[in-house]
Amino acid sequence: MPEYPDNTAGTPWLGAFDAGTAYKTGDVVSHSGLVYQAADDTTGSTPLPGGTTLVEDTDGSIVFTGSGWATDVNVLEHGGTQHYTNHSTDYATITFTGVGIAIWGTRQGNFGNARYALDGGGPVTASQYGAGSTPQQLLWSSGALSPGSHTLVITCLGTHESSASDNYVGLDYYVQSNASNAHWTPVSL
């Protein structure tokens, strides 16, 4: 059985949530880009926390700030669009209510680094570089958050890995976990 990514404790990684599977305390599953750990022995018939909501890049909950943002219209993107920029002063602000968030977008040869800062906390840098062009990829996930309103700021850093040809960052959509329950806990990737 594979292990949960980046977990040295050996927590069982079971892949995508399956409504017909019996899970044990500590089992880890994924659903809609968020990762959950079983808090007790349960079955797949126990729903994941409060469900999830997929929010497109065109939704008003995302505010794009800066002059470089553009919209890519592409049938391969979820909903047919993705916002992108390569200006280092540009950022996107997402305000949501829930207990977790996952950011999805394209990994591509001309994409660079983005900084994710949640609720004013310390930023995390993640690369959007990919050797080809692969849309609808998980770019970043928050892990478990306290229930309530949260703000995520995603900033184009204007930097990239040595193999990338430019500094673009993009945002196709996000998935928020709406509520917690006693059986499942969102965890970080």
Image (cartoon, helix red, strand yellow):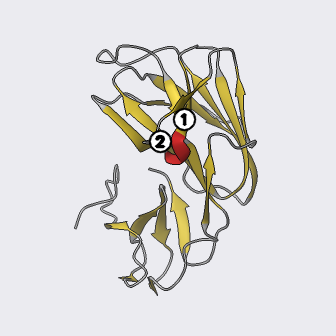
The local secondary structure at tag 2 comes to loop
Residue 20 in the image: x percent, y percent?
Answer: 39, 85
Residue 88 lies left or right of residue 33; in this view the side is right
- Is residue 117 left or right of 140 when viewed as pictured? right
Location of residue 51 with respect to 105 vertically, above or below? below
Q: Which residue is mark 2?
A: 77
- Identified at 32% across, 30% down, the residue is 130
Where is 178 relative to 23, above or below? above
Determine whether 170 is above or below 172 in the image: above
**Where residue 175 sits in the image (x, y, percent)?**
58, 53
- Label 1 SS: strand
Q: Is residue 145 above or below residue 169?
A: below
Q: Which residue is mark 1?
A: 82
- Disc 1 to disc 2, C-alpha distance: 6 Å
The numbered disc on residue 33 is none
| Residue at x-position 34% and y-position 58% | 4
The amino acid type, in three-letter code, at marker 2 is: Glu
| Disc 1 and disc 2 in contact, CB within 8 angstroms | yes
Residue 103 visible in rendering: no
Give coordinates of residue 35: x percent, y percent.
47, 60
- Label 2 crowd bin: few (<14), some (14–19), many (20+), radius 10 Å: many
> What amino acid is labelled 1 in the image?
Gln
Q: Out of 25 and 105, give the one closest to the viewer.
A: 105
Q: Indicate which disc, 1 or 2, sits on the residue closer to the N terminus.
A: 2
Quadrant the N terminus occupies: bottom left
Instruction: Left or right? Give the position of 117 relative to 15.
Output: right
Residue appearing at x 67%, y 67% in the figure: 179
Image x and y of residue 44, in percent = 44, 82
